[in-house]
Amino acid sequence: MVYLAARALPRVGEQVLPSRTAKYFDELVKKIPLEKIDVFLSSLAEKLLRKSKILILKVDNKVTFYLNKFKSGTNGKEIAKPDLFETNTSEKQETEK
């Protein structure tokens, strides 16, 4: 009896029934335009990266402005610093007098 059951068991597994949902899904996937989607996503990523670069540069300019403002202590206005050569020539003129 075990022998007959063992012989009949593999026959049950050999029958493969085709699935309609697998064929439908395969046909649906074939209809999707993957190339167009890839081009669209690439252009979208490029645009987002360019805009983020511009935003980062604007933030960098603002940070630089505020750093210079703290550095100079004059609310963003430049302080007239004497030039090295100007002080040197003024000292020579005083010693010549």
Image: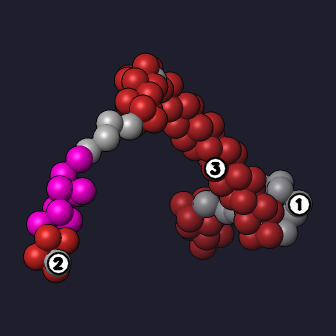
Q: Is residue 83 above or below residue 20?
A: below
**Residue ranking furthest to the right:** 75
Give the quarter of the image for residue 13.
Answer: bottom left
Which residues are drawn in magenta? Answer: 7-15
Q: Point out which mark residue 64 bears.
A: none
Disc 2 from disc 1: Cα separation: 100 Å
Q: Which residue is mark 3?
A: 56
Other-residue count near label 2 (Cα within 10 Å), few / some / many at <14 / 14–19 / ≥20: few
For marks 3 and 2 on the same chain, the one whose residue lies earlier in the sequence: 2
Amino acid type shown at disc 3: Ile
Taking the spot 73% from the left edge, 65% from the top edge, the residue there is 67
Q: Residue 90 appears at what percent x and percent y?
A: 63, 64
Q: Point out which mark residue 75 bears.
A: 1
Taking the spot 61% from the left edge, 60% from the top edge, the residue there is 83
Give the quarter of the image for residue 65.
Answer: bottom right
Q: Which residue is mark 2?
A: 1
Q: Nearer the viewer, residue 3 or 31?
A: 3
Q: Does the stretch in magenta take in 47?
A: no
Amino acid type shown at disc 1: Asn
For marks 1 and 3 on the same chain, the one whose residue lies earlier in the sequence: 3
Amino acid type shown at disc 2: Met
Q: Residue 16 appears at what percent x and percent y?
A: 26, 45
Q: Nearer the viewer, residue 65 or 3?
A: 3
Q: Residue 75 appears at what percent x and percent y?
A: 88, 60
